[in-house]
Image: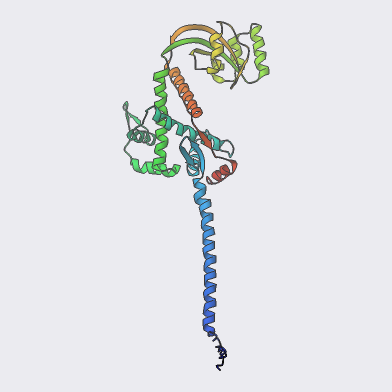
């Protein structure tokens, strides 16, 4: 009879503890891994903060004009550039939006000029810059320019306005495009002769005085004397309110009234943008030559009309808010 073999008990082998120096090395390695992770995390956070504050902030969009996006970097540069104009009041409320509208208009001009097939060659931009940096001097009746280091002078100017050559040339090009477009509309839309009226104007600052002067005119008061006494514009006081012969478009807000007015008649006070106008027409002509200065004014009016049409037909998306404005203003300090 066979016997079943009993399973032999497994022999247990005692685990050998690693030496203390090896345990300390493992702990040290874990500590350094942990410290390295902390350092990487800190570097990552600092890098993200730096990108968000110094890279992404400059790249955030400010306005999009049709397919062209203008970022904060360009906006801040234009804020700084136009702040050099002594006629512009610098504040954190209206000034940023003035510059924003200039940026929009500049982009609309460049895009619109392309549609009109109007261009400015690079050499004309260079010549315009040269003429600005080195104004001509009169030498025995001939306009001459002194010999100077133009490159050095130009680089100093770029350092002063903190723009690159490309950025500044684009601004100059846009100014020249505006002149070209204005001249284009002068040739296309501005006549050399037209119906005109001999206009007399009294401009008053408030309603009370306006109706006081109107009552005195109705009572037989002298228009010229009252213009000298009451007009708030120095030129009208000096001329006794006589602005001479004018075609339509020189005083567009008064056109409908002035050209419908009978000779010698005087209007009631008319409230428009600059104040209260009292108008008299002393003569009329069906057709007269338009002086050069008025042709320039009419051409500029045609340009402004065209630019407004570009604005209305285009797609302009503004992303500016007060937080972005405050950040941009801080960069100017």
Near-viewer residue (13 or 223): 13
| Rendering coords of residue 160 (x, y %) | 44, 43
Quadrant in which the N terminus appears: bottom right
Question: As drawn, which residue projects farthest toward the front?
Answer: 1
Q: Is residue 202 above or below residue 140?
A: above
| Rendering coords of residue 36 (x, y %) | 52, 68
Q: Can residue 296 be seen by looking at this rendering?
A: yes
How many numbered badges does the structure rendering display?
0
User: Which of the colour schemes (rainbow, by chain, secondary structure, one colour) is used?
Assistant: rainbow
- Residue at image position (49%, 30%) is 314
Q: Is residue 159 above or below residue 195?
A: below
Q: Quadrant of residue 161?
A: top left
- Residue at image position (64%, 6%) is 220
Q: Can residue 240 be seen by looking at this rendering?
A: no
| Rendering coords of residue 121 (x, y %) | 34, 33
- Residue at image position (57%, 10%) is 280
- Residue at image position (48%, 23%) is 305
| Rendering coords of residue 13 (x, y %) | 55, 88
Question: As drawn, which residue projects farthest toward the bottom?
Answer: 1
Near-viewer residue (68 or 95): 68
Asked if residue 137 lies left or right of residue 314, the reply is left
Q: Quadrant of residue 232?
A: top right
């Amino acid at each position: 009879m066979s016997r079943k073999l009993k399973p032999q008990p497994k022999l247990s082998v005692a685990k050998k503890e690693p030496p203390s120096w090896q345990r300390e090395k493992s702990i040290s390695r874990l500590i350094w891994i942990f410290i390295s992770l902390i350092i990487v995390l800190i570097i990552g956070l600092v890098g993200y903060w730096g990108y968000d504050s110094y890279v992404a902030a400059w790249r955030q969009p400010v306005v999009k004009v049709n397919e062209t996006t203008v970022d904060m970097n360009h906006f801040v540069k234009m804020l700084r550039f136009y702040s050099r104009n002594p006629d512009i009041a610098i504040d954190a409320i209206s000034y940023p939006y003035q510059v924003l509208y200039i940026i929009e208009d500049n982009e609309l001009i460049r895009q619109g000029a392309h549609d009109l097939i109007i261009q400015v060659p690079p050499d004309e931009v260079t010549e315009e810059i040269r003429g600005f940096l080195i104004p001509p001097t009169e030498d025995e009746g001939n306009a001459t320019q002194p010999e100077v280091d133009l490159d050095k002078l130009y680089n100093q100017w770029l350092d002063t306005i903190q723009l690159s050559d490309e950025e500044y040339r684009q601004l100059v090009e846009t100014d020249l495009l505006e002149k070209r477009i204005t001249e284009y509309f002068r040739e296309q839309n501005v006549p050399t002769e037209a119906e005109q009226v001999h206009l007399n104007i009294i401009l008053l600052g408030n309603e009370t005085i306006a109706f006081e002067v109107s009552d005195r005119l109705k009572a037989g008061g002298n228009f010229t004397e009252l213009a000298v006494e009451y007009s708030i514009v120095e030129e009208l006081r000096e001329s006794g309110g006589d602005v001479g012969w004018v075609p339509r478009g020189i005083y567009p807000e008064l056109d409908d009234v002035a050209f419908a007015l009978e000779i010698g008649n005087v209007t009631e006070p008319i409230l428009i943008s600059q104040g209260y106008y009292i108008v008299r027409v002393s003569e009329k002509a069906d057709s007269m030559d338009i002086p050069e200065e008025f042709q320039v004014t009419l051409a500029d009016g045609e340009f402004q009309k065209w630019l407004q049409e570009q604005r209305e037909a285009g797609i302009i998306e503004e992303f500016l808010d007060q937080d972005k404005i405050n950040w941009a203003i801080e960069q100017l300090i």
